[in-house]
Amino acid sequence: MYTFEIIVGTTLGSAEYVADHLAEKLIEQGFQVNIHLDPKLESLPIDSKHPWIICTATHGAGDYPDNIAPFALQLQQSSPDLTRIQYSVIALGSKSYDQFCNAGHMIDRQLAKLNAKRVTKTFEICTLETPIPEDAIDGWYPQWLNNWL
């Protein structure tokens, strides 16, 4: 059984709400979940039983939110071997910006570069189209879960 490590990048709280909603669904299925609001590479297990879910908003001009930026920098600077990590990315943003969901796509590219295994393509949530972003998880979750079972 997996223990999902949900790594959250949030500025205004939407990504945290999405992560909490996803965690509830995973727990209902019997999985264990750890949510990381201040993620640090050294506090995350790097093995096949602890898949990572990155749930991040995009801040400013396509940047990482402040709470996840140090983690992204850690990945870049230390270049850990993540071949044992499976991951998914949930990216939040507004299509009114040129850099829609850019933080999610940047972390996805970084994880792939470090040999982590992407389970599904990045799930984008537009906060203009989905005013309550966690509602988007309900439609996405069943198909996503099939990739893990």
Image (cartoon, rainbow, N blue to C red):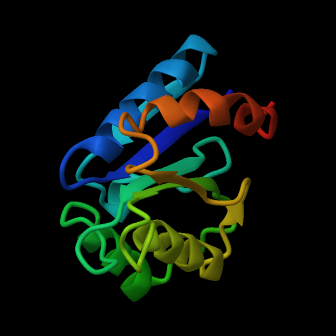
- From what the image shows, is residue 85 above or below residue 5? below
From the viewer's perspective, tell me whether residue 13 is left or right of residue 22.
left
Q: 19 or 60: nearer the eye? A: 60
Front residue of this view, candidates 19 and 44: 19
Q: Is residue 8 visible?
A: yes
Q: Residue at x 72, y 39 (%)?
A: 144
Q: Position of residue 97 (x, y in %)?
A: 36, 73
Question: Where does residue 81 sit, x and y in percent of width and height?
Answer: 59, 75
Residue placed farthest to the bottom in the image? 77
Q: Residue at x 52, y 49 (%)?
A: 53
The quadrant where residue 31 appears: top right
Q: Residue at x 45, y 53 (%)?
A: 126
The answer to whether residue 36 is seen in the rendering is no
Residue found 37% across the figure and 68% down from its top: 96
Q: Quadrant of the C terminus?
A: top right
x then y, percent, for residue 70: 25, 72
Quadrant housing the N terminus: top right
Q: Nearer the viewer, residue 60 or 52?
A: 60
